[in-house]
Amino acid sequence: MAGSGRHGFIGTCLITGASHGLGAALACELAARGHRVLATARRAPTELPGEIAGFDYMQADLAQVDEVAALADWALAESGGRLDLALLNAGLGFYRPLQAETAADIARVLQVNLDACVHLAHALHPALSGGALGLVGSVAHKGAAGMPVYAASKGALDGFGRALAEEWRGEVRVRVLHPGPVATGMSERAGRPRGAIDRFFLSPRAVAAALLDALSAPRGADRQVISYLRVGRRGLWRGLVPGRR
Amino acid sequence: MRVLLSGGASGLGAALLHACMARGDQVTVIDAVPDPQGAPEGPAGGLAWLCHDLGAADPVAWAQLETALVDRGPFDLVVLNAGISATGRFEHIPLADHRQVSRVNLRAPLQLAMVLQHRKALAPGARLVFVASLSCFTGYPGAASYAASKDGLAAFARSLRRPLRQAGVVVQLLCPGPMDTPHAARHAPKRAGRERRMPPERVAKLVLRASPRRFLLLPGTGAHLAALLGRIAPRTMTRIMGRVLFDKLKQQGR
């Protein structure tokens, strides 16, 4: 990763949703780039995959407001009140039409995908001064007929990040990064049947690397899509320049 | 025509209520205010005022609301308009206020839309209008949770557009700019001129007369222009909003 110090965020990073898929790939990529990783997810520490087991870890369910508050306290204590990056990646969604939704699931999706991010940004603000806040959205943020509640939550995250990036400009770098389809198994867990198109999903590792590049670049838009073009361009560049991470 | 409005006590909701009552519609209002001041007179049964706190998750209260909506429906026009805001520096606004904005502006309309679909309370050919904001095109530094809720609502409306069309329901997204309402007076920077804000009665007229073929409803030339610039140069528009609104809010210690 180019750069070091607070704005290159070589230092302490918090990542949510770190036990699986893109979150696990992001945590590993951050560690490979020399950062100290504070990881969190819903899973118990004993159920973590091997590559995450070595990180400082707190089990927290972001659907529970008190656990979000406890997570913020833990991150502040572990980082000594100085976080270089908070990467809010945890997400939840259901692939189903509105008539199949329930009030409890609407509340849960909005709590995990939006309200927990608002809560953590609010609580961690003093520690992030000079650092960066990354919000992991989705290309569904513009609307998705198959998952309207998830799309609403990610659209909201996009609007939140857009406003906050302007408010915190010059103090905390805020970026909303919208990955395209990633082969994490999330869409099957969300209820979408597997199909031939799944073969074209992006690898979590490649998306994680492209996403961290976008987040650490000193220049760039506040809201970026990390999909085929971006990931492919990075892969091509690495192929042309041997030895480049 | 049977009309359902969320938030009818003031601003755009009150303007819609008066316009609908004046043309003889049967109107149902959901509002946290229990006793409407100055609610328009109409024929017996013309207005039903359902007092309900949209920010609350109480399942009993929601079940009662659901029953009342079934009794009063099916609706030909639904305008999900209720909204609150929280303005100032994001980190200075209490977390509880951000949470309440999210509940009232986003969770509640999602849940209401779900209830209306579950209970078949939308008449064939009905219009379902989500009231978002021009901030969906410009961004809104100084009201981060409000901006989030309105962008979320816009994404939700876009997601529902096609599936509900197949069910014979028209989904529309209203993105008004600043209106001359008590809500705007509370949240705009002090000394911001009222004269450039649009009267809510004009916006209400646009909603009631809108063609069902249009998805996006933008009231006024200024809103069209801001939306166009927001599409062409989103970063620049957000910067301008930062200068015009957020810097003033900061100077005023909010």
Image (cartoon, coloured by chain):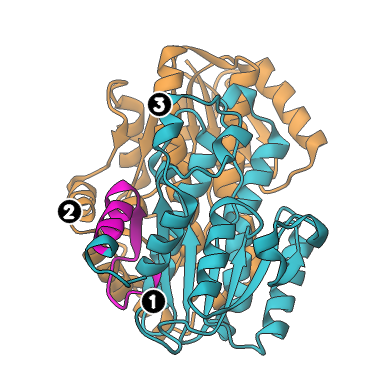
Q: Residue at x 59, y 67 (%)?
A: A15
Position in image of residue B21 (x %, y %): 48, 26
Position in image of residue B234 (x %, y %): 25, 59
Q: Which residues are magenta?
A: A215-237
Quick check: A203 above or below B142?
Answer: above
Local packing at callout 1 (Cα closer than 10 Å; few below 14, some 14-19, many 20+) is some
Quick check: B167 above or below B57?
Answer: above
Q: Chain of mark 1?
A: A
- What amino acid type should be assigned to the residue bearing mark 1? Met
A99 or B4, which is in the foreground?
Answer: A99
| Residue underneath mark 3 | B161
- What amino acid type should be assigned to the residue bearing mark 2? Ile
Chain shaded orange: B
Chain shaded cyan: A
Determine the image quadrant of residue B61: top right
Q: State yes or no: residue A223 in magenta.
A: yes
Taking the view exactly as shown, the residue that stands out farthest to the front is A242
Tag on residue B232?
2
Regarding residue B32, the answer to whether it shows in the image is no
| Residue underneath mark 1 | A1
Position in image of residue B141 (x %, y %): 39, 68
